[in-house]
């Protein structure tokens, strides 16, 4: 790699960005998740590099850093598009219930599957891998709902965002506690209101900074402060992703805040102008981070692992369980939601991020990383199948009303 010039590196990076924009257009045309094209491009680059005599791989630390920033940007992007209205409460409850129920059922089922397959492995070790595999990827869902009507689009966005938050909270609780007792559970439950308070403080501080500041360059300063708050929350073992989502929801719904003294410092018009500017900047940033994350992940993958028996058996069983469990869950609790919600089960950025965060004491040495690749690949193909089968156009049906 030392033989490459700065111009060649710049040309390569810009080419990847242009390709990613092209993949987004392809996704809208044929409903193929752009993540599949990005992963395939990464593997193609790996093959080309090996043919040229390069055998380099990207460090996992880089993937973890990109994944963390990407997760923050994706959740922020989603929350800046969501409106909280009285008539939306039913939709939000349904999405939260669906995310929590599917996460729990999937995690328990996959834990049992891994415990059976690997024999005498401790349940906690199997549960760590199961939680990583059970989180629906908002990074893949959110760019894939453009063709749906408003109700279905909002349901899937809320559901995937809640799945990210709940899955990360559950995984961190398991990974950070060697023993689980009443004290650990009490701290976990108590950390949620602390995170909500942090969310309120962060929201108000950032909004006032945006409104009152007269400097021209301030939005990436805001992003840096959000990331710092997220990292600080992680150091304090708090579910700090709640703070990120809270900031976006407050900015996008500022006019409905009843506490009028706040409006003296930040009027509805000022905050609305901030939201209008934050949305495209956040979307572009999330797009950029997502592009390089999946390209690098694809570059690190060896497609030959897909032929390993463990990858085929375990990965196939995991994906089948996703579809079957989601079918029964939606059929019982959300009878009107089967298509295309049944097929929106992709795993992606968060799954990779949590997989790399599994502590040594919870690792299963025999677990093939190819299972991760198989699940991401096949679950994205399932999403594509559901998108193709669903023929409805994005007709605005209006918000869901209370019955």
Image (tube, helix red, strand yellow):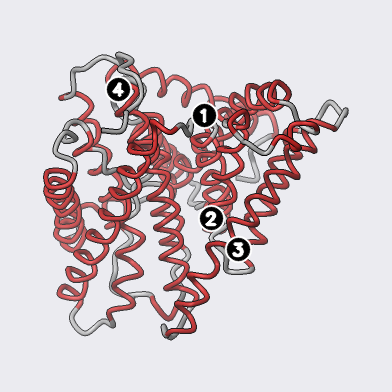
Q: Residue at the location (65% across, 49% down)?
A: 200
Q: Residue at the location (14% across, 57% down)?
A: 317
- The tag earlier along the polypeptide, 3 or 2, is 2
Q: Quadrant of residue 234?
A: bottom right
- The tag earlier along the polypeptide, 1 or 3, is 1
Residue 273 versus residue 323 in the image, above or below: above
Q: Is residue 125 left or right of residue 202?
A: left
CB atoms at circles 1 and 3 under 8 Å apart? no
Q: Which residue is mark 4?
A: 148
> What is the crowding at mark 4: few (fewer than 14 residues within 10 Å), some, or many (at least 20)?
many
Q: Which residue is mark 3?
A: 194
> What is the crowding at mark 3: few (fewer than 14 residues within 10 Å), some, or many (at least 20)?
some
Label 4, label 1: how many angstroms apart (C-alpha)?
28 Å
Q: Nearer the viewer, mark 4 or mark 3?
A: 3
Label 3, label 2: how many angstroms apart (C-alpha)?
26 Å
Q: Please, what secondary structure does the residue beneath circle 1 have?
A: helix
CB atoms at circles 4 and 3 under 8 Å apart? no
- The spot of residue 162 in percent (x, y) is 41, 48
Viewer can see residue 13:
no
Q: Residue furthest right?
A: 214
Please name whichever residue, 118 or 251, is drawn nearer the observer in this view of the structure: 251
């Amino acid at each position: 790699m030392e033989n490459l010039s700065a111009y060649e590196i710049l040309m390569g990076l810009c080419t990847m960005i242009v390709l990613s924009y092209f993949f987004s257009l392809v996704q809208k045309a044929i409903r193929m998740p752009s993540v599949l094209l990005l992963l395939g491009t990464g593997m193609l680059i790996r093959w080309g590099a090996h043919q040229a005599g390069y055998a380099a791989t990207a460090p996992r630390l880089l993937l973890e850093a990109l994944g963390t920033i990407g997760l923050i940007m994706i959740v922020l992007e989603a929350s800046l598009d969501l409106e909280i209205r009285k008539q939306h409460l039913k939709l939000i409850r349904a999405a939260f219930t669906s995310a929590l129920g599917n996460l729990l059922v999937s995690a328990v089922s996959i834990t049992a599957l891994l415990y059976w397959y690997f024999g005498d492995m401790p349940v906690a070790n199997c549960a760590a891998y199961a939680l990583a595999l059970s989180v629906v990827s908002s990074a893949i869902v959110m760019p894939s709902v453009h063709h749906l009507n408003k109700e279905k689009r909002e349901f899937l966005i809320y559901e995937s965002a809640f799945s990210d938050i709940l899955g990360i909270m559950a995984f961190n609780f398991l990974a950070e506690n060697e023993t689980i007792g009443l004290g650990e559970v009490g701290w976990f439950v108590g950390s949620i209101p602390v995170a909500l308070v942090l969310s309120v403080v962060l929201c108000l501080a950032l909004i006032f900074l945006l409104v009152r500041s007269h400097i021209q360059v301030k939005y990436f300063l805001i992003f840096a402060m959000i990331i710092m708050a997220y990292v600080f929350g992680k150091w304090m073992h708090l579910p700090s992703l709640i703070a990120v989502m809270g900031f976006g929801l407050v900015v996008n719904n500022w006019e409905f805040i009843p506490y009028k003294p706040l409006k003296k410092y930040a009027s509805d018009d000022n905050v609305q102008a901030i939201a209008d500017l934050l949305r495209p900047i956040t979307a572009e940033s999330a797009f950029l981070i997502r592009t390089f994350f999946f390209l690098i992940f694809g570059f690190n993958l060896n497609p030959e692992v897909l032929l390993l028996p463990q990858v085929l058996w375990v990965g196939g069983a995991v994906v089948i369980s996703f579809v079957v469990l989601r079918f029964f869950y939606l059929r019982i609790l959300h009878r009107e939601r089967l298509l295309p919600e049944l097929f929106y089960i992709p795993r992606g950025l968060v799954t990779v991020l949590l997989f790399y965060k599994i502590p040594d004491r919870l690792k299963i040495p025999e677990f093939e990383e190819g299972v991760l690749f198989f699940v991401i690949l096949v679950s994205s193909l399932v999403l594509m199948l559901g998108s193709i089968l669903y023929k409805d156009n994005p007709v605005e049906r209006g918000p869901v009303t209370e019955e």
